[in-house]
Amino acid sequence: MPAAEIITIGTELLLGEIQDTNTRYLARTLRDVGVDLYRTTVVGDNVERIAGVIREALGRCQIILTTGGLGPTVDDPTREAVARALGVPIVFLPELWEQILERFQRYGRQASENNRRQAYVPQGAIPVENPVGTAPAFICEVGEACIICVPGVPREMEYLIEHVAIPYLTRRYQLSGTIKARVLHAAGIGESVVDDLIGDLEMLTNPTVGLLAHPGQVDVRITAKAGSVEEADRMIEGVEATVRERLGEAIFGADSETLESALATELARRGWGLAVLECNLGGDLRARLERVALPQERAVVQSGDCLDEGLNARLATMMHEMGVEAGLAVSLRPGPDKQNLTLLARSPLGEARAERSYGGPPTLGIPWAVHTALDFVRRTLVTPLEGEEV
């Protein structure tokens, strides 16, 4: 199976002026057709540096995908860089120039002399017409390897990858497999504890298991490489069952599921409304809950500063006034070495109170507190208790 590398080109990416979304799209597309991606590189608009990255990549992989640097200006260096990496000149293709002129005419615009640069490609390259933009793409075949260069404009890049690059790679390398990933989300448990519980699974080679920590949340990624989606699903299912068994109620969802969506689902199942009082969270908890539809439109979030000893009374008043069954009060207080969190939950199941502390980077204190609060209410209010009739 061929391996691939992605090279995104543009000084604006290195300077942080724009965000690189192309790499994410390309990585997932390659994964879906079973191509291993070993490295991604961002390089500025410098011919020699780009050429050097391409030469290095040719020594490691069979598929190189580049995005960007195919415009009409002097600082669009991809064509020249690929030619220099391969030791060939760039050549003018009249048919490409005709395509560019026709595209400009269709847009009701006049092509400039600068646009002629886009009709040049490295000698021996396969030109690729761009029906959704003015910058043609091209493919260079180098023995068993290939270099596919597409524009950096996301809409154009995605079209050419889907309609040209993937069909080309499928034919050239007889691609038939897939790489599929499933991500399980855990809360209320640290990364080191998760690692201790499933460390042996992280040694597997196919499927593979990896961890990614966020403030208040740990993701467990299970990735399988197989001949079909169905086979990959079967491989993932066995490992997923083991992870869920070992981590228990710490697992709250998978893939696109969030703590707030899991909470909303359980509240809807019970037919409960929810009142939330957040203190010193900057409205972040409210923002998270507004992403989901809480049941029966009987939900309210109030923000402000409050003393811990007043949380219970204020929460009870809110619940009574709103006519809701469940309530959550959250208060975050900064300290000299750590941030302290008080959590209070009320429902027909009873009351629960907890104290938590966070000693990580201060800027991550609020995200940690929001995750912790959502997990607390999920566990104490909506997760069925042992022996409970629901």
Image (tube, grey):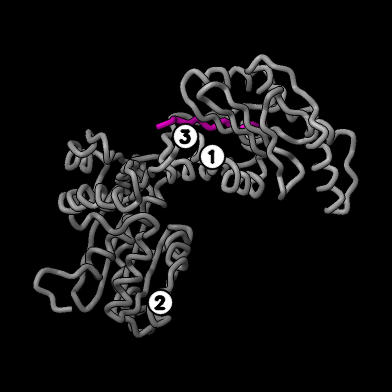
Residue drawn at the location 31% of the way across and 58% of the way down: 253
Q: Nearer the viewer, mark 2 or mark 1?
A: 1
Front-most of residues 309 and 46: 46
Count neighbours of disc 3 (C-alpha within 10 A) and say few if under 14, some if 14 to 19, many if 20 or more: some
Disc 3: which residue = 173
Asked where in the image residue 323 lies, by quadrant, the reply is: bottom left
Can you give x and y, in whole percent of width and height, for residue 175 in the image?
43, 39
Q: Which stretch is magenta?
A: 1-10
Label 1 packing within 10 angstroms: few (<14), some (14-19), many (20+): some
Which quarter of the figure has residue 269? bottom left
Mark 1, residue position: 23
User: Is residue 323 on the magenta stretch?
Assistant: no
Of 213 and 49, the residue lying toward us: 49
Whether residue 15 is visible to the viewer of this picture, yes or no, is no
* Horizontal arrangement in the rendering, residue 233 relative to residue 19 (left or right): left
Instruction: Locate residue 360, reporting x and y percent.
Output: 36, 40
The residue nearer to you, when weighing 152 against 17, is 152
Q: Which residue is label 2 attached to?
A: 299
Task: Kindly identify the amino acid type of the residue bearing the numbered disc 3.
Answer: Tyr
Q: Residue at x 81, y 31 (%)?
A: 117
Q: Amino acid at mark 2?
A: Ala
Q: Tell which circle, 2 or 1, labels the residue nearer the N-terminal end.
A: 1
Helix, strand or loop under label 2:
strand
Q: Is residue 69 left or right of residue 187?
A: right
In the orientation shown, which residue stands out farthest toward the top?
A: 87
Q: Nearer the viewer, mark 3 or mark 1?
A: 3
